[in-house]
Amino acid sequence: MSMTAGQRKTFGVTWITYAGFYLCRKNLSIVLPLLAVVAGLHSYQLANIVFGYSFLYAVGQFGFGFLSDRIGPKRVVGAGLLTIVVCNVMMGLHASVIWLLLFACLNGVGQSTGWSGLVKTMANWFSYENRGVVMAWWGTNYVLGGFLATTFATWSVSPHSPLPQFGGARGFLFPALLLALIVPVFFLNVSDAPVDGEKSSGEREVLRRATLSQTSWTDLGMLLCKPSLWTIGISYFFLEVCRYALMFWLPYYMVRQLHYGVQTAGYLSSLYELVGIAGALAAGYISDKFNQSRRAPVSAIMLGGLGFVMLCQPMFVHAGLAGIGVAISLAGFLSYGPDTLLSGAAAQDVGETRAAATATGLIDGIGHLGAIVSPYLVVFVSERYGWDRLFFIFAGTAFLAGLVLLPLWNLRAATQTTSRFTEPALQEIF
């Protein structure tokens, strides 16, 4: 598809911005094993920190999506960026549990402004016709961003990076510094919607819909009555139990259970996001080009594949470092495909332009309740029953996430001629 100059700039800057959010999110996964070794924090204290972050992130999703629809996403996202930078600097200054928990929670609040607000911006600038493809490419921001964030944080805490006297604190300070450079780029280059005087004919229609798109409490109530929103949210909940556990705890698992070094674990775990890029793009293209913009079939099939990979995890471990790399790569491909669809294109399909941020925030918020569960699930099951049992549970959550989507097999995006918040026809496949 062709894009106007304004669309290209919006796409590029919002892509960089949300990739920047991950600089100060994925760094925690690299610092966790260092906190256990250097600061002497035990696994449940680390779980408390991840829980605090995840809880405030989930709560923020419910409110900031609606707020982005009401007052505009640029203000909300901008405030979140500044909060994240400050919190990560503060986390790098002290390593006590209470201190880290406090600023991890506030970091979660800042992080929760990003996705729904930027998805709203994209909905204002791009029409529905190529939503799956556009959002597939745009959704690589947190997949590739997660990969770059993991490798950057791993390098930051290595003996060869600058300022070695700061030790593991560099895993917080260096990402915060890099994100601070992105903040003015966002403020100077992103508009909530196309501006008068610099619109093409294609952008005028997008602007017309965006101008009418300030959501209301009535719209929120109508969204909450849509079965498709709850179905996608529940599926996303089960997916996020697995994805967030892998995202935050893979390095810890490889250091503590498989006895690899922090650098090896950090770089190897980055394959999860690196190969996930291909999964995100494949899912978007298949849903738009071969499935008539239906998101559920691709998501359900990929989630079934993810469950199978989790079941086979013990066999991959026995194959050594190469086997672990293959397992992480497959898991990334099969989890980021449905993740980008459910939290991006499918959320826009449900909310339409008028309430895109609200729908995205609700679905992301429901999904991240699963992220709240994951830290204690990881610690409790791994310590009491072993890591293999934990991966079997992840297989179960992946299978459940796919099964929940089956009633939405034929759900398609609403067209421009569809009346506002009309639930597209749902066809049972059973």
Image (tube, rainbow, N blue to C red):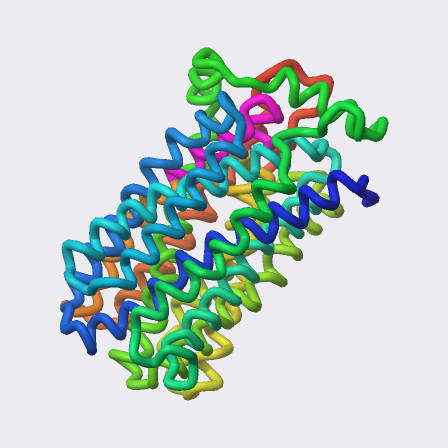
429 or 221: nearer the viewer:
221
Q: Position of residue 95 (x, y in %)?
A: 20, 64
In magenta, the rendered stretch is: 348-366
**For residue 32, above or below residue 229:** below
Identified at 49% across, 37% down, the residue is 116
Residue 411 placement (x, y as % from top left)? 60, 32
Residue at image coords 37%, 64%: 173
- Residue drawn at 46 percent across, 11 percent down: 218
Q: Is residue 350 magenta?
A: yes
Describe residue 259's horizontal placement relative to residue 188 as left or right. Answer: left
Residue 276 on image: x %, y %: 55, 62
The image quadrant where one finds the N terminus is top right
Residue 246 appears in view: no
Residue at x 51% of width, y 36% of height: 117
Relative depth, front residue between 30 and 84: 84
**Residue 361 is drawn in which quadrant?**
top left
* Side of 144 relative to 128 (left or right): left
Characterize the magenta stretch by its predominant secondary structure: helix
Vertical comparison of 229 with 385: above or below: above
Image vertical order of residue 287 relative to residue 407, above or below: below
* Furthest residue toward top: 218
Q: Is residue 359 magenta?
A: yes
**Is residue 162 visible to us here?**
yes
Place residue 419 in its image quadrant.
Answer: top right
Q: Please state which of residues 302 and 185 is positioned toward the viewer in this rendering.
A: 185
Residue 106 position within the rendered picture, expressed as x and y whole percent measured from the top left: 29, 45
210 vs 174, left or right, is: right
Eyeballing the image, is 209 above or below 183? above
